[in-house]
């Protein structure tokens, strides 16, 4: 909490006194009025000519050397200019700090601490069994740790600290508030922006955050440069650094990690890590997805958390997980040890735990007689052999889109945890028959898929070990030659997986190739090949 409290601006301290009779007369001449002019206090540096048609209620302190105070009503507040306040129905209880502009707005009132400081998120479970308090500067990693131990020492200490926090209502410095109909008990910190939002109540807007274009936020935290836009609705949640809730997206009792997008879809009682994307109408509920970097496709329902008995079921997702169009994920389900895997379009998955990274889970073309109805087919390592373009491009994309400054995000791929999961999956593929394979969940594994998975994992792990050796101490001539072979193989697979689109598309869409250009014009492929060339040249 010390980090959050360090972001709060100091309250301005300037000498002030009631206006002289001459100044009061001039203000009345300019259309101003006061409930009690003796409680309207001005600093010696205030220029009364900047104040017009304004009503003062209660005790108001004003320091206005430059700017404007027109057509507004102030009650029990402080104005520390230079500021611009124009056409506001009421500003009550706030301190307006230098550089701030508040124009064409309704009622801005401060009656006590933001509700966000006493609200808890239900991360990973909707009934509140994994309830987590909101520290305005917490990271997704910290929130995940508390969700796993909601009654542990860290969570309890945070609750105790939040209970003792005392904050005052501030707008700014350098905030811009335009067309806000209602702003209530909300901290608006440095450079935050509200541009024609819906109601905003009980929130904390960290520096650079914004609420605009009809979006609403209630009892929530918008971290650095986080945004609510185009009718987005945020309640009892944290929007991570640089993330956005937009286009009617709904975020409720959740933590949306840094550099993520929630548009049109709904995320409830969930934690999603950085670079998570929900661009279309879909549902993610009661999910813990701490590593993020994944996607939820249109029409996906990762949300069967209600058994008709209690809505207390859960979902765990691994790093880089992709839920395809129209997928229905039945709970409870744990894919946390299946990073960078795909649930194929239009399928329904059964309650299960799956532990195979880089896999494809898809509806079967045919189901062996001994396989129960409802089981899908799992192809371990399929991403590494048949869809490497998507994996490589996602890593490139996340690197280019990263904007975080205040949130710890590990950019490395693959991380040590992903490598460890892959080694574990490889050992199981080597040591168990396809028909009795631990970790496949309620899916079936063919012998051919088992063998292909072994090869895919072995190749990846060999490449990882060689790359780490290259970075740490260099490679022998033989190892360098082998590493070049693996890099050539990776390039071939990346290009081949992309060429599937170029070979299929023109046969269906007449001008497909003309609009998209040749594969050589693909920005990612050009950069990918350049990086590979540089790496091979350095061996």
Image (cartoon, rainbow, N blue to C red):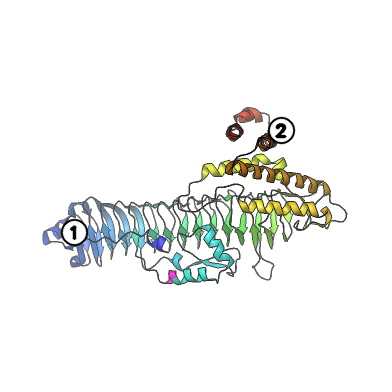
Alpha carbons under labels 2 and 1: distance apart: 74 Å
- Residue named by callout 2: 508
* Mark 2 / mark 1, whichever is N-terminal: 1
Q: Could you tell me how many numbered marks the image carries?
A: 2
Q: Please identify the dominant SS of the magenta region.
A: loop
The percent coordinates of residue 62 (x first, y second) are 23, 59
Residue 35: image quadrant is: bottom left
What residue is rendered at 47% in x and 61% in y?
Answer: 220
- Residue named by callout 1: 43
Q: Nearer the viewer, residue 247 or 87?
A: 247
Q: Is residue 241 above or below residue 396?
A: below
Q: Is residue 146 above or below residue 396?
A: below
The percent coordinates of residue 474 (x first, y second) are 60, 40
Secondary structure state at the residue bearing disc 1? loop
**200 inside magenta stretch:** no
The percent coordinates of residue 119 (x first, y second) are 48, 67
Q: Is residue 213 above or below residue 184?
A: above
What residue is rendered at 69% in x and 63% in y?
Answer: 332
Which residues are drawn in magenta? 161-168
Q: Is residue 515 above or below residue 312?
A: above
**163 inside magenta stretch:** yes
Q: Nearer the viewer, residue 238 or 393?
A: 393
């Amino acid at each position: 909490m010390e980090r959050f409290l360090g972001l709060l601006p100091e309250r301005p301290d300037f000498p002030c006194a009631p206006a002289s009779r001459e100044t009061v007369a001039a203000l009345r001449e300019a259309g101003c009025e006061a409930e009690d002019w003796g409680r309207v206090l001005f600093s010696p540096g205030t220029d009364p000519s900047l104040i017009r048609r304004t009503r003062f209620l209660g005790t108001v302190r004003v320091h206005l050397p430059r700017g404007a105070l027109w057509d507004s009503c102030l009650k029990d507040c402080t104005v520390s200019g230079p500021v611009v306040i124009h056409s506001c129905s009421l500003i009550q209880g706030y301190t307006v700090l230098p550089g701030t502009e508040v124009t064409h707005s309704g009622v801005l009132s401060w009656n006590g601490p933001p509700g966000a400081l006493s609200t808890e998120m239900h991360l990973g479970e909707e009934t509140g069994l994994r309830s987590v308090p909101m520290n305005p500067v917490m990271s997704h990693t910290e929130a995940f740790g508390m969700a796993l131990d909601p009654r542990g020492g860290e969570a309890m200490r945070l609750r105790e600290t939040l209970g003792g926090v005392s904050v005052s209502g501030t707008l700014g410095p350098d905030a811009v508030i335009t067309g806000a109909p209602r702003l209530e008990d909300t901290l608006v910190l440095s450079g935050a922006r509200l541009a024609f939002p819906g109601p905003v109540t009980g929130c904390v807007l960290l520096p650079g955050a914004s609420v605009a274009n009809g979006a609403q936020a209630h009892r929530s935290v918008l971290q650095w440069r986080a945004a609510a836009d185009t009718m987005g609705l945020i309640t009892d949640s944290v929007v991570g650094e640089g993330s956005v809730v937009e286009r009617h997206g709904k975020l409720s009792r959740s933590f949306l990690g840094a550099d993520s997008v929630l548009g049109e879809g709904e995320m409830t009682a969930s934690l999603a890590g950085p670079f998570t994307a929900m661009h279309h109408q879909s549902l993610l509920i009661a999910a813990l997805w701490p590593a993020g970097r994944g996607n939820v496709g249109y029409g996906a329902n990762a949300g069967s958390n209600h058994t008709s008995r209690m809505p207390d079921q859960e979902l765990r997702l691994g790093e880089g997980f992709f839920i395809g169009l129209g997928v229905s994920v039945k709970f409870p389900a744990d894919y946390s040890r299946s990073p960078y895997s795909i649930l194929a379009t239009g399928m329904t998955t059964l309650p299960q735990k799956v532990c195979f990274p880089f896999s494809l889970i898809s509806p079967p073309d045919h189901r062996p007689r001994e396989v129960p109805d409802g089981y899908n087919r799992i192809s371990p390592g399929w991403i590494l052999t048949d869809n490497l373009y998507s994996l490589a491009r996602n890593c490139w994309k996340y690197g280019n889109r990263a904007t975080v400054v205040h949130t710890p995000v590990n950019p490395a791929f693959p991380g040590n945890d992903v490598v460890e999961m892959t080694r574990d999956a490889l050992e199981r593929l080597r040591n168990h028959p396809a028909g009795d394979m631990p970790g496949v969940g309620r899916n079936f594994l063919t012998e051919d898929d088992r063998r292909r998975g072994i090869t895919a994992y072995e190749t990846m792990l060999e490449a990882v070990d060689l790359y780490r050796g290259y970075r740490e101490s260099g490679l022998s001539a033989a190892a360098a030659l082998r590493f070049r072979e693996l890099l050539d193989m990776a390039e071939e697979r990346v290009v081949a997986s992309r060429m599937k689109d170029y070979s299929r598309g023109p046969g269906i869409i007449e001008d497909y190739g003309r609009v998209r250009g040749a594969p050589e014009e693909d920005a990612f492929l050009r950069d990918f090949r350049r990086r590979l060339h540089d790496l091979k040249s350095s061996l």
